[in-house]
Amino acid sequence: MATVEAPVDQHEIVPADWPEIIETRVWIGREDDYFFALCDEFDVIGQGPTPRAAFRQMVEMVDGYLHVCAAQGLSYHDVRRPLPLAKRTSFHAQALLSWLLRRVVQDYGVRERATSFVPEAAPAPAHC
């Protein structure tokens, strides 16, 4: 499980309804010549030449998205953009099939990975 943390300054604000730690599922797979990492909770995807590179890019993108949302003072309910049920079900089926056939599908199957994020506090608004 990966955790993204950022230093919190005493002048930074995280919206009150946000959880302290955001846990989410990440789907890692391969398409053609690249790997992808799809964050289940926020529908954000990263890609790269390796599974690790795709995962790192996705973590950076989710971290940036959370930072911007916190800076705008959005509620956690408005920030979440979970994958549609049909897409999640499809990934679950692909992950199960990959697990069952792991010796045959080693590089090309979809895998599931859990991760969590610690919401980055947004800077307090500047007063003019």
Image (cartoon, rainbow, N blue to C red):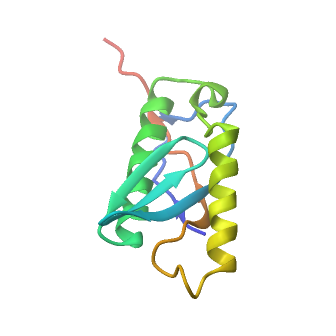
Name the residue located 56 percent from the left edge and 59 percent from the top edge: 27
Q: Is residue 51 above or below residue 69?
A: below
In this view, the residue in front, 7 or 41, is 41
Where residue 22 appears, as percent x and y from the top left, is 64, 49
10 lies above or below 100: above
Question: What residue lies at 57% left-to-right and 58% top-to-bottom?
Answer: 26
Please report the residue visible at 60 percent of the width from the left and 30 percent of the height from the top.
15
> In the picture provided, is 128 more to the left or to the right than 69?
left
Q: Is residue 50 left or right of residue 3?
A: left
Q: Residue at x 67, y 31 (%)?
A: 16
Quarter placement of the N terminus: bottom right
111 displayed left or right of 128: right
Quadrant in which residue 34 is drawn: bottom left
Q: Is residue 97 left or right of residue 63?
A: right
Vertical arrangement, residue 42 with respect to residue 117, above or below: above
Please state which of residues 38 and 8 is positioned toward the viewer in this rendering: 38
Residue 113: name its quadrant. Answer: bottom right
